[in-house]
Image (cartoon, grey):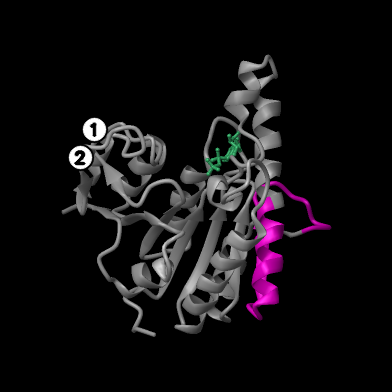
Amino acid sequence: MGTAKYKRVVLKISGEAFRGGKEFGIDAAVTGGIAKQIKNVVEMGVGIAIVVGGGNIWRGAEAEKNGMDRVTADYAGMLATVINALSLQDMLEREGVTTRTQTAISIQQVAEPYIRRRAIRHLEKGRAVIFAAGTGNPYMTTDTAAALRAIEIEAEVLLMGKNNVDGIYNADPNKNRNAKKFDKLTYLEALNLRLEVMDSTALSLCLENNLPIIVFDIRAPRSIERAVIGEPIGTLVSSE
Ligand code: UDP
């Protein structure tokens, strides 16, 4: 086990990562593997807050295409992230990691409401914190929620865990064999690429607040730990 470069991090896990190899829903083996990785990071003394996506269950924009009211569809999407959060919470607790889930939409029988100072206190006590229900607002994404929460709790880095790509490329590597991977990019370069890997609202927030981002493949063994140690992994987006 290496020495952590960062003392406090936010990890974004996309819904796709929860889906793993399954067509729909949650792949227990993959989620369990992620929980084990998070445990190792907690044991390094790193404060880790996890923002969960929901795209494996529901995407507001897709429901809108089928005629659903967008705002209602987005609230359904936010609730989908709560399902992933509870699954991850359970996996973490099974690994022996004390975990608290906080939601941006109050569901008090199920989880705590999001309270910034309380979240920081949990981290200081060595608990893993899961942030669910995105920002609590429609027309937003969980990427934006991750950037926002990272800035709010003064995390030093935003770790974007992906399951379909291992960094940022100049074209979609799953469609274009000649796509080239970047080891590092500036915020402006990343914004100009109009990436699918992260939305521009989230990127702009990181730029304005100088929050470094690491985009990496969460399926790779020890990937979260490697990012936290500061080993070169995936693509680093920063001001330099
Ligand atoms: N969502 C939202 N506001 C937020 C975060 C999420 O309305 O702040 C909704 C939106 O409908 C989105 C869905 O929740 O499609 C799932 O989140 P997201 O697509 O960000 O998950 P991911 O792509 O990471 O799996």
Q: Residues within 10 Å of mark 2 (few under 14, many from 20)?
A: few
The magenta stretch spans residue 103: yes
Which quadrant would the C terminus be assigned to in this image?
bottom left
- Report which quarter residue 88 is drawn in: bottom right
Instruction: List the single residue furthest toward the front.
Output: 177
Gap between marks 1 and 2 measured at Cα? 5 Å
Seen from the viewer's position, the closer of residues 131 and 17 is 17
Q: Which residue is mark 2?
A: 189
Residue that appears at 40% across and 42% down:
202
Q: In this orientation, does residue 113 appear?
A: no
CB under 8 Å between discs 1 and 2: yes
The magenta stretch spans residue 193: no
How far across and how far down the image is residue 74, in percent? Answer: 64, 32
Quarter holding ligand 1: top right
Seen from the viewer's position, the closer of residues 46 and 181 is 181
How far across and how far down the image is residue 138, in percent? Answer: 60, 32
How far across and how far down the image is residue 45, in percent? Answer: 46, 83
Q: Which residue is mark 1?
A: 192
Residue type highlighted by circle 1:
Asn
Left or right of 98 in this view: 167: left
Residue type highlighted by circle 2:
Glu
Residue that appears at 20% across and 39% down:
189
Which quadrant would the N terminus be assigned to in this image?
bottom left
Question: Magenta residues?
Answer: 84-110
Q: Is residue 147 above or below residue 228?
A: above
Q: Is residue 13 above or below residue 122?
A: above
